[in-house]
Amino acid sequence: MTTPKELGTYAQNTWCPGCGNFGILASVKKALADLEDDGLDLNKVAIVSGIGCHAKIVDYINVNSFYSIHGRVPPPMTGIKLANPELTVIGYAGDGDAYGEGIEHLIFSAKRNIDMTFIVHNNRIYGLTTGQFTPTSPPGFKGRSTPKGSPEDPINPIEIMVSAGATFVARGYTKNLKHLQSLIKAAIKHKGFSFVDVLQPCFTFFNTYDYYNERVYEFSEQDHDASDRNAAFVKAQEWAYGEGERIPIGIFYQIKKPTYGDKLLAGRIPVRLKPGDIGPVLKKHI
Amino acid sequence: MEEISILIGGKAGDGTRQAGHVIASLLNRIGYRIFFYDDYPSLIRGGHNFSVIRASEKRIGAHKDMIDIIIALNQDTVENHKHRLKADGIILYDSKKVETQGLGIDFMSIVKEFDGKPIMRNTAAIGALAGILNLEWSILENDIKNSIGKDIDLNLKIARNAYDRIGTSLKPVRKLDQQSLPLVTGNEAISLGAVKAGLNMYIAYPMTPASAILHYLAAHENELGVVTVHPESEISVALMALGAAYTGAKTMVGTSGGGFALMTEALSLAGQSEIPMVIVECQRAGPSTGVPTYTMQGDLNFVVYAGHGEFIRVVLAPGDADEAFYLTGLAVNLAWKFQIPTFVLSDKHLSESIFSFEPDLDKVKPEDPLLWDGQGEYKRYLDTPNGISPLAFPGNAEAIVKVSSYEHDENGITTEEPGQIARMQRKRLRKRKALADELGKYDTVNVYGNLESKTALLCWGSTKGACIEVAETLDLKVVQPLVLEPLPVESLKKALSGVEKIIDVEVNATGQLAKFIAGQGFCIDDMILRFDSRPFTVDNLLDSVKEVLS
């Protein structure tokens, strides 16, 4: 039995007061503690982060961790999961390194349906580099690199993930803490690639609390059939990270599909493989 | 020395490489040692492909320009190579496709006689060659049975017909009283060396001339106990490998210069996080796309200096298949013992040429890294006297394993505190001493030829084979460093002691090894550089060395 508090470390938390990341950290710790009660071995959990404010989370959770580099969260996660499929692998990325520098890895993770959970701390701003537009900033966003307004439209990661083949696609909001905890728990429990985009306001550079508080609403399985791919796209289009009156949060899409590890490894566990005998192979060379 | 060189050429798609393999195998079966050079442009159909099969009584690591028998399946083969034919050489050619002097046979009519497929022209050519060489039919028969997957009877009939058409054996080869050896490419030797050292995973994105490592390990996954993965890019390859190694899987990646360029951010991450990383870099002619299917030793500087920040690495440069086997095994073991990135620096000429393979297989075995003993609290980056921290892996019930791209404390938690930062950098660089001691147990510099000679050819990697033969002819010494980083300065000094003239031989335009070792006080007297993307042949290098010496 580990309490969320015991899941902390001695690392000093350096997020700004009011940062949305606190909500994600609390949700993850609570989800892990709950899942431990359900039988999850916390020593078999490995978490991975990229670079940016979000990434400090690995220093704040006392489990195995790999503090990766910007944009490169899914590849180490994939290496960990393939090397030892018995591990539960959870990744954290900002919107910069999930949707900007490393988007190909995200798309391929979804395409492969590898069994791991990917949580995006989506504040729609580069915080640690002090305020530039990201792939999900609203149209015309005035940041330090785009003082006249961003010339790009945002991407819609929910649509992209459903298209690419993710088998669990959800969006949460850090203020709706209980809802976020339940999403993260469901994502970790899901066998396949689980994707959770978390609306996480940056209190210092892009304070969106009021904007979200007015528009965000939770939907449930009564309102939406998450096994219906077309319905998932329709739901995703309710809000395209630009203007819009209502922002749905919940599970957009969830289906069962064989995972990459099941297909690629076919029961093998690389960390326990014994080297083969090269003798018989060499005989074929004569 | 009993030897013969055979060149077979045709269009891409004619199957000349496969035919060359059968010829090499035939000569292997009667006791000859083989060097097989494969030359092909970057296309799928058409163009001009050729292979040179050199067979010798002694083990060899290079081919020659001058050829005893040219087998021409197209006119280009004659036009491009007839100047290479020895005075008493023979051209065996397809008389319907090629106009020249020599021994013309209508291979296609033989194929048609038995309702064969056009690709079986090769079989007819091989049958005729066996007749020219005066090989026993049973040797050819066995070889066809072993090497051709389908239509064996049909191929046998075609080969026999062509074999019988050769009345007199024009170039008889003597059967030697030597055992046949496995014929192995550099890439296959790299694969086998890694497996022998305990490789669990090989991760790679296709890139010539490294792709064959991926193909070979993927084809033999179950026999060799390796999981192979082909991800979306070299960036992903390198980072997946770090994730897998963090988890405890011995992992290797392979690529050429362009792919390695994409891996350099992961290389620095390996340096900071102390995750073992094994990288095979098979060089090809650059810069950039360069000449994709041809060779160059152009990436020495790149590999030695790649990555931002300061960290320890090992660069090993095998010169033939046996060394590729040993040094890849060593690269795997060193990466894990010292938790550093290690490189096997190959090139197209080593990776894709075929060698007679005779290493002591038992010399490579998995060596245990320093593992955590389970006592006390686990610290991934424990500051130890030799800088090496004991390893534990995720899943260990007693340990929490935290690795980081950030500077970190002993537990792997981020730090920006100056004392801590300097301490951890010292800890990582301190491994250099233990690494040097470990390398001292191995041959780090090889010498060949006349060890008393006052003139030495200095070479690295695949130029070794040509250098040794030239040195034997001219009574010179050859010095070949196998470890390029950290440079084994004392061993190199010893190897060069008494030498008054050093001739540096490299397949690049600027003499990268010469410049690299100049920084350690080694003065080069002359340089022989080839940078037309073709390797040195024995005769071509001999001419160049004679010119330098005259």
Image (tube, rainbow, N blue to C red):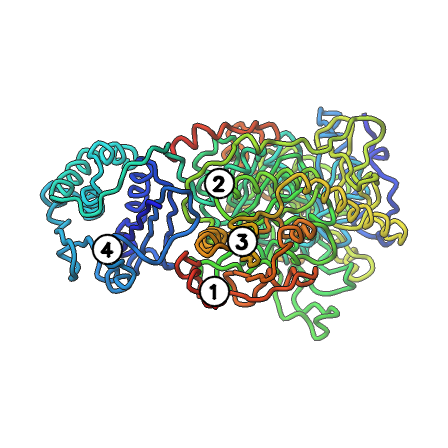
Q: Is residue B222 left or right of residue B363?
A: left
Q: Residues within 10 Å of mark 1 (few under 14, many from 20)?
A: some
State the SS at label 4: strand
State the SS at label 2: helix
Q: Tag 3 or tag 2, which sits nearer the N-term?
A: 2
Answer yes or no: do the residues labelled 4 and 2 have beta carbons within 8 Å? Answer: no
Q: Which residue is mark 3?
A: B477
Q: Tag 2 or tag 4, which sits nearer the N-term?
A: 4
Answer yes or no: do the residues labelled 2 and 3 have beta carbons within 8 Å? Answer: no
x, y percentage for residue B398? 78, 27
Q: Chain of mark 3?
A: B
- Foreground mark, 3 or 1, reads 3
Q: Which residue is mark 4?
A: B89
- Foreground mark, 4 or 1, reads 4
Q: Which residue is mark 1?
A: B530
x, y percentage for residue A23? 79, 45
* Residue nearest the viewer, comparing B112 with A168: B112
Q: Residues within 10 Å of mark 3 (few under 14, many from 20)?
A: many
x, y percentage for residue A171? 66, 46
Q: Tag 1 or tag 3, which sits nearer the N-term?
A: 3
How many angstroms separate mark 4 from mark 1 (CA)? 27 Å
